Amino acid sequence: MPASLALVKAYWDGPARQRAVSLWSIGSWGGSGVCSLFGGLVADNIGWRYIFFASIVVAIIGLLMMKGTPESKAETKGSYKFDLAGVLTFLVAMVALQIVVTQGNKMGWTSPLILSLIAAVIVFGSLFFRIENTFSQPFVDFKLFRNPTYTGATISNFLLNGVAGTLLVSLQLVQLGGDMSAQEAGTLTLGYAVAIIAFIRVGEKLLQRFGPRKPMIWGCLITGLSILLLSPANMLLADYKIMAMIGYALFGVGLAFYATPSTDAALSSLPAAQAGSGSGIYKMASSLGAAFGVAISAAIFTALSASPESVAWLEGVITFAGRQDNLAVREAAIIALMFNVFMVVVAIMSIMLTVPKTGPKKVQ
């Protein structure tokens, strides 16, 4: 994915690049929009294992589609040396952090293993930053973050991809709390898949008219509103399904508004020689954001639903209609979804503090 984004930067410029970014985003962001629907259909009708076989087929098709694509390589000075130390320290730190986030509650936050992993995150994370700041050709070039537009686009990209946890929590809510099948739950997200594909080009037009800052903020606001619409787990299931369908559609609209302006703002800030590195970091932010967002949301939801007394205070604040035997699941979902709203708020703040109202300035 980073390489394909770098090719967009290499082949197109101006409005043509923005159109290319929109089409790229339809594949990247739009592909994620059909995941829940496709996964639910496959899991219920064929079996969840076949999702992996389908992924292999898609990967092979993607490989065949790249046949004949001309190579594009930026000119570099001197010989290239792979930053093995940076990659390894980063890998160890991220794996340890993922285990801490996902397994900390199950193993115990003060267990020797979790404390050791926390120490590993600190040690290897510190080593990573030290290596990257001294290596001549670093795995992550922190000099790119001297540019405020690139910084805001990348940070908000990390956070807005983190709200992927919204899908996990809301779908688990209707399945565990409402006894819906995976296919029935997946069909609720149809509006998300349609909206994110249909509105990607709208985000492009907004970018061309207003610049990247406003569409990025508007996209975040709409995404935040969609999560709020998915949050009232105190409603009856029939009413919640209506709210969910509206919420998923707005979720797609918000991400569509954000996608092209953010990606183009990041690419516009990069000189040709740094397109590969910058695109890699930007796309890595997407992947890490989604991974950590899903992991943290799942950890919150699982931990709280397994410990009803920890969220029982919500019963004194919110009136829960309908069944009362699933209150733990419904209460845990509300808290987990509020975490996703928090990430959207931080994303908006990062855009407002870093992305200038004027056009992006290239990194020197």
Image: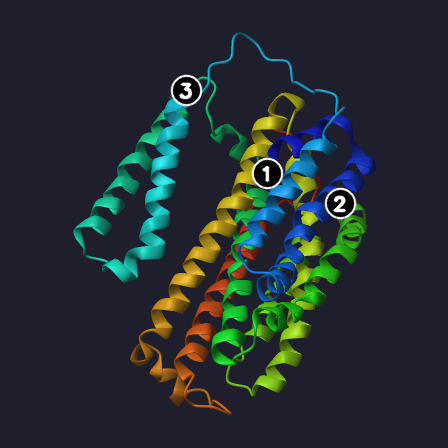
**Quarter of the image containing the N terminus?**
top right
Q: Residue furthest top?
A: 78
Q: Nearer the viewer, residue 162 or 146?
A: 162
Q: Secondary structure at mark 3?
A: loop
Q: Which mark is residue 150?
A: 1
Residue placed under numbered mark 3 in the picture: 135
Mark 1 Cα shell of 10 Å, populated few (<14), some (14-19), many (≥20): many
Q: CA distance from mark 1 to mark 3?
A: 21 Å
Q: Nearer the viewer, residue 205 or 192?
A: 192
Residue 20 horizontal side relative to residue 180, left or right = right
User: Three-letter amino acid code at disc 2?
Assistant: Ser
Q: Secondary structure at mark 2?
A: helix
**Residue 241, position in %: x, y?**
63, 79
User: Three-letter amino acid code at disc 1?
Assistant: Tyr
- From the image, state whether disc 3 or disc 2 is nearer to you: 2
Mark 2 Cα shell of 10 Å, populated few (<14), some (14-19), many (≥20): many
User: Three-letter amino acid code at disc 3?
Assistant: Phe
Q: Secondary structure at mark 1?
A: helix
**Residue 273, position in %: x, y?**
63, 21
**Residue 31, position in %: x, y?**
67, 51
